[in-house]
Image: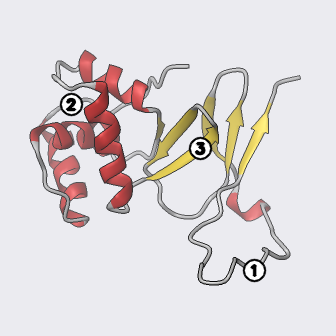
């Protein structure tokens, strides 16, 4: 699976990326600004893998390592700009939409997409262990085509 839809790295995208970083008080280094522009420069939300973002950065002419992409995505998550969605022990996606919403994981294409939020309902969640609280509930519905 390869992430194929990224914003073009132009001046408008770079400004949007820098504004996105500024909202969360993330220092806009050159590499962070470029990666932010690829992620949100066109105003669209997206689900990306670190590898897909790395390839998009390389194809845009950015000199960035895969480790830097991972570290930057972690910093974006820590700042509340993205959520990490783990679909299995070896695969995570990073979502630029931070509102609570469920996801479909398409097993054949390895793609993560949004599922209709209004159609998922929980009647009850278990009480968290003493001294803890529920931070968030991730719902990933795995699909395979018939």
Which quadrant is home to the C terminus?
top right
Counting other residues with Cα less than 10 Å from the Cα at mark 3, is it few (<14), some (14-19), or many (20 or more)?
few
Residue 19 percent location from the top left of the image:
19, 57
Residue in the picture at 70% in, 54% down: 139
On screen, 81 above or below 33? below
Residue at position x 23%, y 65% from top?
23
Q: Earlier in the sequence, mark 3 or mark 1?
A: 3
- To which quarter of the image does residue 11 belong? top left
Nearest-to-viewer mark from 3 and 1? 1
Q: Is residue 111 left or right of residue 122?
A: left
Name the residue beneath numbered marker 3.
86
Mark 2 or 1, closer to the camera: 1
Along the viewing direction, whichever of 122 and 68 lies nearer the viewer: 68
- Give residue 44's quadrant in the image: top left
Task: Please name whichever residue, 44 or 106, is drawn nearer the observer in this view of the structure.
Answer: 106
The residue to which callout 1 is attached is 127
Q: Residues within 10 Å of mark 2 (few under 14, many from 20)?
A: many
Label 2: state its secondary structure: loop
The picture places residue 45, in percent across and down from the top left corner, at 44, 47
Res. 9 mark:
2
The reply to whether discs 3 and 2 touch (Cβ–Cβ < 8 Å) is no
Q: Which label lies toward us, 3 or 2?
A: 3
Q: Name above or below for residue 119 compared with residue 69.
A: below
* Distance of label 3 from label 1 (alpha carbons): 22 Å
- Residue 17: give x, y in percent of width and height: 22, 48
């Amino acid at each position: 699976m390869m992430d194929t839809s990224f914003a073009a790295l132009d001046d408008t995208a770079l400004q949007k990326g820098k504004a996105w970083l500024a909202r969360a008080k993330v220092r806009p280094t050159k590499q962070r600004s470029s990666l932010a522009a690829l992620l949100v420069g066109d105003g669209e939300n997206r689900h990306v893998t670190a590898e897909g973002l790395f390839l998009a950065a390389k194809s845009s002419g950015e000199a960035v390592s895969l480790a830097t992409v991972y570290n930057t995505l972690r910093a974006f998550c820590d700042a509340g700009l993205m959520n990490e969605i783990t679909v299995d022990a070896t695969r995570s996606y990073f979502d630029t939409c931070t509102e609570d919403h469920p996801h479909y994981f398409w097993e054949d294409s390895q793609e993560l997409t949004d599922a209709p939020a209004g159609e998922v309902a929980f009647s009850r969640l278990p009480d968290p262990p003493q001294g803890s609280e529920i931070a968030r509930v991730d719902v990933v519905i795995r699909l395979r085509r018939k």
